[in-house]
């Protein structure tokens, strides 16, 4: 009779055989898999090195192109805005001073004068600020003499109209006539009042009215009130354009997105036919486009410029304007 120990030894032998088979099979299989994986890793590392080399090459080309644009920019824009004046409006706190200085330098190279820079704070477009702005607009001492506002309850439209009237010099009523220049006291009064409400600040010691406006912006807005905020900013850009002799809104690629100011204006059929937009102002080519677009605006032509969808790379180089 087969006893229990025989069954136990048999079972142990079976399990040992199975385990040994698994180990031998796994070892043979792992060897193949390991070799395959090592081959794939080596291939991926080689691809990575190739891509890194390609990226470095493309970056070098980009740097060279940017450097070239930086060098030829002043020559390209020279004489395109001779005798003109430009006021800068900085749409948010993300517009850095280096960009402002670079745009200012290029505008001056075109023959124009920059009359100052106004920086909007987040409170300017905040729907929660509407009540305090309405109080300012309706207070007895809020508006300078000669300033008239449209008949509307839209706070953004009212403030935009007010700023446009004190920051922009309209074209002469008749060709060859004199432009009506806003009183400097009125400009200072409005800017001081809005500064007291913390909706804007002055980025230059003085700000005076100008014939043209460059509206610089950066990034995109977020939150439930992004649409309302962009509407208020867009209203200001359009008001500056309608009151003055041409406005260009320039931002980066993020600003050209759905919730950016450049993107908002481009999505608005009416606004996009009035105001020129640039979506790569952070690059030398974009700054050149900003100045050239402003010159085109002075001749009554608006456009979309940069790298975005349906945008022209750069505006046409206009014929230099004669000195005023």
Image (spheres, grey):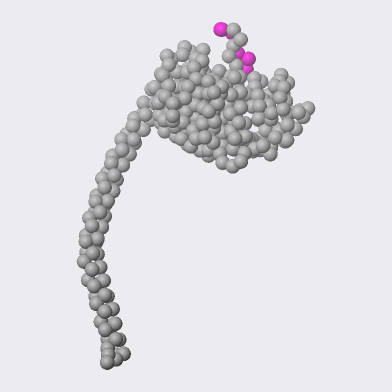
**96 left or right of 68?**
right
Horizontally, is 113 left or right of 51 in the view? right
Which picture quadrant has residue 128?
top right
Name the one closer to the observer, 16 or 54. Answer: 16
Q: Is residue 179 magenta?
A: yes
Q: Residue at x 28, y 78 (%)?
A: 15
Q: Residue at x 66, y 27 (%)?
A: 157
- Which is nearer the eye, 219 or 138? 219
In the rendered image, the vertical position of residue 149 relative to residue 38, given as above or below? above
- Asked if residue 198 is among those painted magenta in the image, a careful observer would answer no
Residue 20: percent from the left, percent from the top? Answer: 24, 75
Residue 155 visible (yes or no): yes
Q: Compared to 192, does 245 lie above or below?
A: above
Q: Is residue 56 left or right of residue 196?
A: left
Residue found 26% across the figure and 71% down from its top: 22
Q: Quadrant of the N terminus?
A: bottom left
| Residues in magenta, as a range | 175-181
Can you give x and y, in whole percent of width and height, for residue 312 in the image? 42, 24
Q: Is residue 7 above or below residue 317?
A: below
Q: Residue at x 64, y 37 (%)?
A: 126
Q: Residue furthest right?
A: 140
């Amino acid at each position: 009779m087969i006893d229990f120990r025989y069954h136990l030894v048999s079972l142990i032998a079976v399990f040992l055989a199975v385990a040994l088979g698994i180990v031998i099979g796994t070892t043979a299989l792992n060897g193949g898999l390991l070799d395959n994986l090592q081959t794939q890793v080596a291939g991926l590392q080689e691809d990575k090195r190739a891509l890194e080399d390609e990226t470095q090459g493309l970056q070098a080309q980009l740097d060279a192109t940017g450097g070239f644009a930086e060098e030829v920019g002043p020559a390209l824009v020279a004489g395109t805005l001779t005798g003109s004046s430009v006021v800068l409006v900085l749409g948010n706190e993300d517009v850095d001073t280096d960009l402002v200085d670079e745009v200012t330098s290029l505008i001056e190279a075109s023959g124009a004068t920059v009359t100052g820079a106004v920086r909007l704070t987040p409170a300017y477009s905040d729907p929660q600020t509407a009540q305090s702005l309405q109080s300012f607009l309706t207070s007895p001492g809020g508006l300078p003499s000669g300033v008239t506002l449209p008949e509307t309850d839209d706070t953004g439209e009212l403030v935009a109209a007010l700023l446009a009237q004190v920051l922009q010099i309209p074209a002469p009523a008749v060709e060859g006539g004199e432009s009506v220049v806003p009183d400097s006291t009125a400009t200072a009064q409005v800017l001081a009042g809005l500064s007291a409400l913390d909706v804007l600040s002055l980025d230059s010691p003085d700000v005076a009215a100008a014939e043209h406006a460059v509206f610089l912006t950066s990034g995109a807005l977020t939150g439930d009130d992004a649409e309302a905020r962009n509407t208020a900013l867009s209203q200001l850009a359009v008001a500056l354009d309608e009151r003055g002799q041409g406005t260009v809104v320039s931002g980066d690629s993020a600003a050209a997105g759905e919730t950016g100011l450049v993107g908002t204006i481009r999505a608005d059929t009416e606004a996009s036919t009035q105001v020129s937009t640039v979506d790569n102002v952070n690059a030398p080519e974009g700054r050149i486009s900003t100045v050239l677009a402003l010159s085109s605006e002075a001749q009554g032509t608006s456009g979309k410029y940069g790298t975005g969808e349906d945008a022209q790379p750069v505006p046409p180089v206009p014929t230099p304007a004669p000195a005023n």
